[in-house]
Image: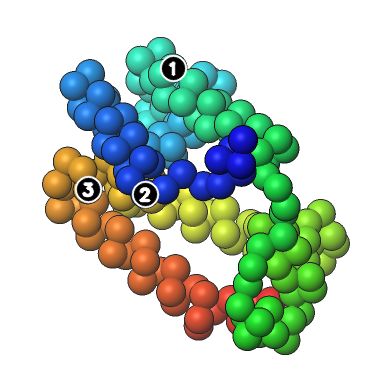
Amino acid sequence: MNWIYEPWPWYVAGPVIALVMTLLLLFGKSFGVSANLRTVCSIAGAGKLADFFRFDWKKQIWNLVFVFGAVLGGFFAHQYMTKSHTIDLNPATVENLEELGVKNAGQSYAPEGIFGLEALDSWQGWLFLIIGGILVGFGTRYAGGCTSGHAISGLSNLQLPSLIAVIGFFIGGLVMTYLILPYII
């Protein structure tokens, strides 16, 4: 039963993703996680405030079920299929993170110093959440979708806007990681 605790190899996970994408194409669906926020807002009645939320959200229930399954699957994998929550980080990475003030780097997938509740005890933590949320929300709307939608669904459909968006996501991630984040933490 040791296979339960290991990540799926690329030659299994890749074809499974390709199969899911093929089925979505055959059924005329497009994959994306950020579209669910629009669906949830529409269900909550946001269509009374903005035309953007006025659409037949019942056609998107399948996508909500998918996201619910992803969250549920992540929970079960984390709780019951993970041997250890520590990760093997390069010692130089641990040292760099400690210089930035991140304690216990490598002890969990999401360091408590950045992602724990104590991050909300400072104005920097709140600023990080608010500005990050606005940027993610604006960015997904401006780009016409999120990273999963563009990188998985858009690229598999050979859509040029998705290629441009994915290149932009990578550039933005590199800029944030190397040029902005060291000054925020």
- Give x and y (percent) for residue 91: 66, 82
Q: CA distance from mark 3 to mark 2?
A: 18 Å
Coloring scheme used: rainbow
- The numbered mark, 3 or 1, whose residue comes first in the sequence reads 1
Mark 1, Cα crowd under 10 Å, few <14 / some 14-19 / many 20+, is few
Mark 2, Cα crowd under 10 Å, few <14 / some 14-19 / many 20+, is few
Q: Which residue is mark 1?
A: 61
Mark 3, Cα crowd under 10 Å, few <14 / some 14-19 / many 20+, is some
Q: Circles 3 and 2: CB distance less than 8 Å?
A: no
Task: Name the residue at 31% across, 50% down.
Answer: 151
Task: Name the residue at 35% across, 15% down.
Answer: 59
- Whether residue 144 is visible, yes or no, is no
Q: Does 46 appear above or below 84?
A: above
Q: Does 100 appear above or below 83?
A: below
Task: Name the residue at 51% across, 47% down.
Answer: 7
Q: Quadrant of the N terminus?
A: top right
Q: Nearer the viewer, residue 86 or 32?
A: 86
Mark 1 residue type: Ile
Q: CA distance from mark 1 to mark 2?
A: 30 Å
Q: Which residue is mark 2?
A: 10
Side of 95 where 29 appears, left or right: left
- The numbered mark, 3 or 2, whose residue comes first in the sequence reads 2
Q: CA distance from mark 3 to mark 1?
A: 24 Å
- The numbered mark, 1 or 2, whose residue comes first in the sequence reads 2
Q: Nearer the viewer, residue 6 or 174?
A: 6
